[in-house]
Image (tube, rainbow, N blue to C red):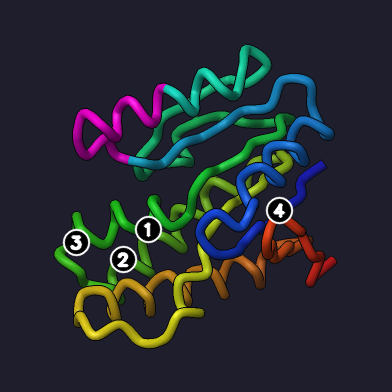
Amino acid sequence: MKKITLVTGGQRSGKSSFAEKLALSLSANPIYIATSRIWDEEYRQRIERHQLARGDQWTNIEEEKKLSQHDVTNKVVLVDCVTLWATNYFFDLDSAIEQALIELKQEFALFTQQNAQFIFVTNEIGLGGTPENTLQRKFTDLLGWLNQYIAQQADEVYFTVAGIPMKIKG
């Protein structure tokens, strides 16, 4: 049953909607792991709207970093999103991208050892050119390397553009 799917694309490309539909096609009761931190009141309300929109069929888990502490054996699990998950490591490690990448890869490997169907959503933030800001360049590098790592481990990879998912691996 173990399978890893990566869904990537730009902001508002339709990647999360596609990933949610995919998860629901595989299970009547998938798990949704949201990796975002609550940055302020507006963001908290945004998260609550997303949870309500998903409906009762989802088991919602809020987890900023340690995905592997959740037992998802024999389940379909959607992790949305890798970008925010990487952000949490990046800032907690004071922008040390080498250490963040090591820890993210280790946590990914631990989590995906479970016998489950994993769907990871991420952003392709490097498509828009090189950022002028050093911090943004570092994060773009980190996420690009992490996306490459996950794509290598994945059985399937989809790239979404304008709401259209294109299968590019698997």
Tell me, for residue 86, which label it has, or none. 1
Q: Residue at x 38, y 51 (%)?
A: 84
> Which residue does the numbered mark 2 point to in the structure image?
100
**Label 3, residues with CA under 10 Å away: few <14, some 14-19, many ≥20:** some
- Report the Cα–Cα distance between label 2 and label 4: 22 Å
150 drawn magenta: no
The relative height of residue 3 versus residue 147 in the rendered view (above or below) is above
> Who comes first in sequence, dot 2 or dot 3?
3
Tell me, for residue 93, which label it has, or none. 3
Local secondary structure at mark 1: helix
- Report the Cα–Cα distance between label 2 and label 3: 7 Å
- Report the Cα–Cα distance between label 1 and label 3: 11 Å
> Who comes first in sequence, dot 4 or dot 1?
4
Q: Position of residue 99 (x, y in %)?
A: 28, 70
- Report the Cα–Cα distance between label 3 and label 4: 27 Å
> Which residue does the numbered mark 4 point to in the structure image?
4
Magenta stretch in the rendered image: 37-48
- Report the Cα–Cα distance between label 4 and label 1: 18 Å
Q: Is 126 on the left or on the right of 149, as rendered?
A: left
Question: Which residue is outermost to the left?
Answer: 94
Q: Residue at x 72, y 20 (%)?
A: 29
Q: Position of residue 123 (x, y in %)?
A: 51, 62
> Who comes first in sequence, dot 1 or dot 3?
1
Label 2–label 4 contact, CB within 8 A: no
**Label 2, residues with CA under 10 Å away: few <14, some 14-19, many ≥20:** many
Q: Is 8 on the left or on the right of 107, as rendered?
A: right
For marks 1 and 3, give the one nearer the viewer: 1
Query: Residue flagged by tag 4: what amino acid is it?
Result: Ile
Q: Residue at x 37, y 58 (%)?
A: 86
Label 2–label 3 contact, CB within 8 A: yes
